[in-house]
């Protein structure tokens, strides 16, 4: 089980990313537009830098929804390999059969 603080921090980051997504996209569009004057593009970059760091989508990290484990995460199911095996053994994931030999 992951530390509760790490899971909460990740939730906080996800909230910030959603909150600032439109603003970041608009500023990035202005900064990348070559037809605009250089001063305007530079100001857009400065405004982008003043936004909270955790509002960037690249700072998000996938975690297991059940345990909070950050490694061995299956995106399609949203769980870690350990929980995938446990849920598969119990039969809670349709179409998944745990093999053992």
Image (cartoon, rainbow, N blue to C red):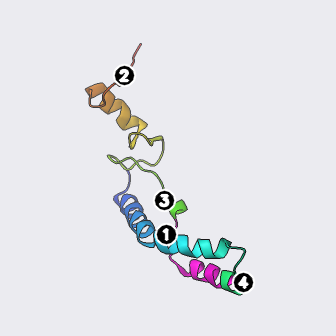
Check residue 60 in the rendering and tell me which mark sits there, or answer none. 3
* Residue at the spot of label 1: 54
Q: CA distance from mark 1 to mark 2?
A: 38 Å
The span from disc 1 to disc 4 (Cα, nearest Å) is 29 Å
Disc on the earlier residue, 1 or 2 = 1
Whichever of labels 1 and 3 marks the residue nearer the N terminus, that label is 1
Local crowd size for mark 3, using a 10 Å CA cut-off: few (<14), some (14–19), many (≥20): some
Q: Residue at x 37, y 50 (%)?
A: 68
User: Earlier along the polypeptide chain: callout 3 or callout 2?
Assistant: 3
In this view, the residue farthest toward the top is: 101
* Disc 4 + disc 2, Cβ < 8 Å: no
Q: In terms of depth relative to the viewer, which is nearer, 88 or 95?
A: 95
Res 37 label = 4
Q: Secondary structure at mark 2?
A: loop
Q: Residues within 10 Å of mark 1 (few under 14, many from 20)?
A: some
Residue that badge 2 annotates: 98
Q: Secondary structure at mark 3?
A: loop
Tell me the CA gap for discs 3 and 2.
31 Å
Which of the 4 quarters of the picture holds residue 45? bottom right
Helix, strand, or loop for circle 4? loop
Pointer 4 and pointer 3: residues touching (CB < 8 Å)?
no
Where are the magenta residues, as a range? 42-56
Residue 14 belongs to the span the image colors magenta: no
Circle 3/circle 2 CB separation < 8 Å: no
Measured from the top left, where is residue 75 in percent x and y?
44, 43
Nearer the observer: mark 1 or 4; the answer is: 4
Write down the quadrant of residue 100 in the picture: top left
The quadrant in which residue 90 appears is top left
In the picture, measured across the screen, residue 26 lies left or right of residue 36, that is left
């Amino acid at each position: 089980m992951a530390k509760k603080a790490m899971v909460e921090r990740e939730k906080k980051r996800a909230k910030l990313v959603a909150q600032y997504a439109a603003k970041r996209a608009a500023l990035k569009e202005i900064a990348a537009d070559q037809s605009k004057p250089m001063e305007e593009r530079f100001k857009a970059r400065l405004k982008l830098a003043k936004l909270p760091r955790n509002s960037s989508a690249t700072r998000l990290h996938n975690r297991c929804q059940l345990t909070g484990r950050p490694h061995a995460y299956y995106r399609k199911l949203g769980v870690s390999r350990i929980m995938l095996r446990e849920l598969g053994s119990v039969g809670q994931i349709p179409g998944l059969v745990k093999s053992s030999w």
